Image: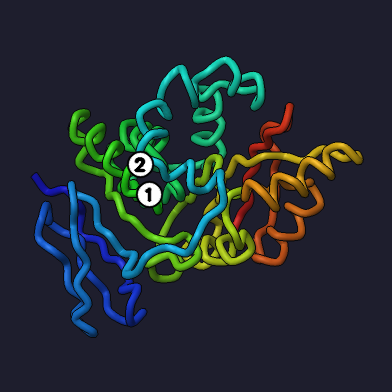
Amino acid sequence: MEYLHHLTVLCSSCLKGHIVLSNYVSADLICPVCQFRYPITNRILDMIPSSPSPKKIIQSLMESKYLVQVYDSLFWRHSPFTMALLQITSEREFGTFYHALTFSRQQRVILDIACGTGIYTRKLAQKMTASTVFGLDISMHMLNYASAKIQENGLANVNLIRCDAKTLPFNEEYFDGVICSGALHLFSDPQQVLMQIHRVLKVRGRFVFATFYKPSGFFFNYLARFSTKFLGLTPFGIETLKRLLKNSNFTDMKIHHKKGLWIIASVMKT
């Protein structure tokens, strides 16, 4: 079975070589320019050449092998506590993401940044069978779980890659749409990540995201400072989000959900 369509990634080492993703399962992929070798494990292309930088508590937890066991279950992502905190179910959130992408045809290339266990990656692949979906995450534990589920569901239009969102290994204007659910608040440099997303997104393509929202007020300001400093989780106020998106040259911001401490929004590359 052809696991990946005839697509390419950009070498993370030399930033020049184009590596063809086609008909691979276990053989390493080699950059044709610098000869850097990228290992493949469990049908996951690993494009992180060195050990990631140290992380804070929440970031380390999200990459833990122990969280993987409960992430896609009633004990975490689908738990009553999570739904009460976010004020939206996982099913409704995915529906919001899917409709916000506003595609007029099925044959697209979609990117799911920080895909985790591949909850939305798999759903997109199932609904858009003529499209190709890339699931990216920095946690190999999460990606291994996602890969097992993808193989279990017989999905041939999904590509899983381990990489850092601050240096996306793709050419400019590569994707028709990009999604990111529950990770923007975890990035150490969200501005850099947004600039990378803008770079790889096609003109008039939409970026749809969900992240923790910071209401106004002294208590929430204090909570946000504590969360950022000690946990590595940074909730965003509306004005901060607008500034970050504007600085990344995104336009046409639409807010699809803003309840509790959770916001779902989308922007366009023009």
- Quarter of the picture containing the N terminus is top left
- The residue sitting at 17% across, 73% down in the picture is 30
Tag shown at residue 142: 2
Is 149 in front, or is 229?
A: 229
Relative image position of residue 77 (x, y in whole percent) = 49, 26
- The residue sitting at 78% across, 46% down in the picture is 237
- Quarter of the picture containing the C terminus is bottom right
Q: Is residue 108 visible?
A: no
Is 142 in front, or is 266?
A: 142
Tag shown at residue 14: none
In the figure, is residue 239 to the left or right of 211? Answer: right
In the image, what residue type sits under mark 2? Met
Mark 2 nearby-residue class (10 Å; few <14, some 14–19, many ≥20): many
Is 154 in front, or is 215?
A: 215
For disc 1, the marked residue is 139
Number of numbered callouts drawn: 2
